[in-house]
Amino acid sequence: MKLLETKILEAGHVLDSDILKVDNFLNHQVDPNLLNKMGEDMAKHYANLGVTKILTLEVSGIPLAFTTALYLNVPMVYAKKTKSVTLTDEVYTSVVKSFTKKITYDIKVDKKFLVPGDKVLIVDDFLATGAALQGLSEICKQAEAEIVGYGIAIEKTFQNGGKYFRDLGYDVYSQAMISSFEGGKVHFQA
Amino acid sequence: MKLLETKILEAGHVLDSDILKVDNFLNHQVDPNLLNKMGEDMAKHYANLGVTKILTLEVSGIPLAFTTALYLNVPMVYAKKTKSVTLTDEVYTSVVKSFTKKITYDIKVDKKFLVPGDKVLIVDDFLATGAALQGLSEICKQAEAEIVGYGIAIEKTFQNGGKYFRDLGYDVYSQAMISSFEGGKVHFQA
């Protein structure tokens, strides 16, 4: 998505050779018009596939998941991060190992909000190792919900996450695909 | 706002005599069309006041803050909850004592995103004791930003938060004002 790539070049900052800081438009300060257009674009990609729910993970996936849900006219559910939960009758739970934060945390979704037969589009702001997407996928599996695809704002294609889900046959749509940060600059996949 | 009141009566659940559970449309599963209309209504209330930023607190304030920002065509900033931070050159920080969760946590906003002269509309999903709003107000004060008002989805008028900010002269606009949960039911302020 050209609009997002342009914004990344204008406003993103490369840190530590493998981290892209986009806190001035995506995940601390949010540009609502950009996120609205990103949601429209995401919804267009997954239109006519019978999506019934958008699933994301708090916090930074929420704006894009929200606008995608608005354009697909379906509810958006965000998994909650939690210190530690045991699987009960009431919630689905999984574990996420954060690449950037070097920590592991549990996530949970109330069973009311994902049911067998749901067709789920999983949305997140970043795809690197795919740890968050794996946690969300595990929750869909517990709910016996079908995963329609993975909609991502920014994918780092030099890490393994995107390849992993594509090799499993899933439709992974990333609006900006970064192939390297060589020389401290963002290079998009050709 | 009639639409929100109707939704609360249809889908909200009163717990423990003073907690309203709205996790099926506001803060776990989100109804994007409702939130879109709430943002439009909120923006209309604060139109023509020169608002330059919407400020909220992660997580559950984000959808309403986002749609309000979209309609006012200004950036949305969410303060981040954090274990503990010291005030540095880079962030404004404050403290919030959560009424529902019985815990205290620090919040922070990068100094890049609030500057002297900003006219800030503070938005949140709930107003009860006003603890979150006080934390966000403190951050605006540190930034020497002006607070234009407080835009809230659901206010519990039987707690002190709303009165506190109105007595200070602020425009507090709550889209649903709950006066009691008498008999386990939601009663709106007449």
Image (spheres, coloured by chain):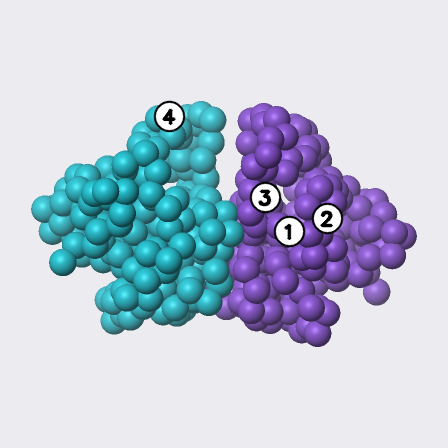
Chain colours: A cyan, B purple
| Secondary structure under the numbered disc 3 in the rendered image | helix
Labels 1 and 2 share a subunit: yes
Residue situated furthest right in the rendering: B167
Visible residue check, residue A53: no
**Between B111 and A137, the one nearer to me in the picture:** B111
Amino acid identity at mark 4: Ile
- The Cα–Cα distance between marks 1 and 4, rounded to whole angstroms, is 32 Å
Look at mark 2 in the image and give the residue it sits on: B144
Mark 2 belongs to chain: B
Look at mark 1 in the image and give the residue it sits on: B115
Q: Nearer the viewer, mark 1 or mark 4?
A: 1
Q: Confirm or deny contact between disc 1 and disc 2 (CB under 8 A).
A: yes
Quadrant in the picture for the C terminus of chain B: bottom right
Amino acid identity at mark 2: Glu
What's the residue at 21%, 54% (across, down)? A188
- The Cα–Cα distance between marks 1 and 3, rounded to whole angstroms, is 7 Å
